[in-house]
Amino acid sequence: MKKAIVCPGIGTGTARLAIALILALSATTALSQSSSAQDKSILSGIVVGVETDNNDRLTRFAVSDSTGTVTTFELSTNTEFGLENQSGDRWVSSQGEEPAESARRLRDHRERFAPITVSSQNGIATSVVEREEGKLETNLGYLFAVFAITWALFFAYVLYMGRKQRVLQHEIAKLKSSIANADRT
Amino acid sequence: MINKVLNRLDPLLILSAALMGVALYLIFIWVPTETNQGAVQRILYFHVPVAWGSMMGILVVSGSSFMYLWKKNEKWDRLAVASAEVGVVFGGIMLLSGMIWARPVWAVWWTGEAKLTTALILFFIYVAYLMFRAYFPPGAHRQRLAAIIGVTGAIDTPIIYFATNLWSQAHPPLVTGPAADADSTLGSDLGIVLLASTIAFTFLFIFLVQNRYKIRKSEDDLVELKRASSTSVMTGAN
């Protein structure tokens, strides 16, 4: 029978502890996720309305999603922007730093029907970024490459170690039996 | 049936896999897209933890090499070899992930700036350490010299960590640790995900080192057995 690969000193008690820890972690993540899901949301769509004050500073904006539902977002000074112009230059700032420029950028997006992704909490936008799905080749391709290479290398290394250990165990067993035979004779 | 399967699995492997699952969920589903770089920024959650693993590796090599020089106990030498090999894997992934990330954000695969160059030197230190062990004749002399290389190799670690502070170039400034700039620290969501991913990769590192250590132990056992076998054959012949 194949022997279990267990670290010396780590028995089934530790295995149970590890499993309990995993279950606790999963439960905590699921609970925290379900509670935060109530007030956090991410929405992608087209800008349909931009509201400013007398100084042309952005106060509110509205986004229409793929079903035609219009959602209005309030802003805070911490609201972050990552929006591109028509030529692809990215502008990064926050509502606290450049409220007038953020209004101008959102109007530009409205005129071009350029989709955005808004992350919000309790109706207040926390980040307003270019919708990433539109750049699959340039962005997600690199992310996928890193993900694939990382896991391919780790799996290959684990397989290599498993194979090497099996070969060594086989050789050790063979030598042990040949020594035992030699001792008997 | 489930108990049978669980008893055959290493608890550390189960823990690493579970933590990795949580980290992947946080990276790809939970954390919002970063405003500056977009989706490609998620590479950070792989790149930084493997870089951490790579630096942790050289610290373990250095510490265990020092202990070997002091105590002359084989187990420290085994730990140094195991950690160096796992460190090469982490170091290689750190360099590859960094290059792939650099391409969309810097428009180049590689640039000769301080952080990248010192990280590449760390990879070469690992490779040199393993090559030395592979090609130098076995024995206590080899282990002693390898331990000296291992101890001196750790000098590169603080240089890598402080490189962006010392020579400010294209690489982003430190976002974690004692020398991190207060203005450039990660936001809470991004920080949580980076921490979760780092913990997951740390457990993976420990699991890999533990298994490589066992292989090294088996290799040493095999050498001993071969010696015993040849002795018993010679005794039998006499």
Image (cartoon, coloured by chain):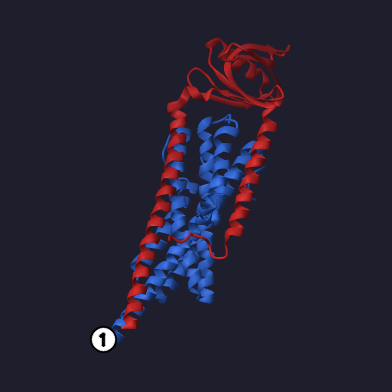
The quarter of the image holding the C terminus of chain B is bottom left
Tell me where residue A174 appears, x and y as whole percent: 34, 70
| x 54%, y 34%: residue | B28
Q: Which residue is farthest front?
A: B1
Q: Nearer the viewer, residue B36 or B210?
A: B210
Towards the viewer: A76 or A21 = A21
Q: Quadrant of residue B138?
A: bottom left
Number of numbered discs present?
1
Palette colour of chain B: blue
Q: Residues within 10 Å of mark 1 (few under 14, many from 20)?
A: few
Can you see residue B163? no
Residue at which label 1 appears:
B237
Tell me where residue A136 sits by quadrant: top left
Residue B158 position within the rendered picture, expressed as x and y whole percent measured from the top left: 56, 56
Please state which amino acid type lies under the numbered disc 1.
Ala
Please name the residue shown 51% across and 50% down the image: B1
- Chain letter, red in picture: A
**Residue B90 visible in rendering:** yes
In the visual, does B70 lie left or right of A146? right
Q: Is residue A173 left or right of residue B113?
A: left
Give the structural element (helix, strand or loop) at label 1.
helix
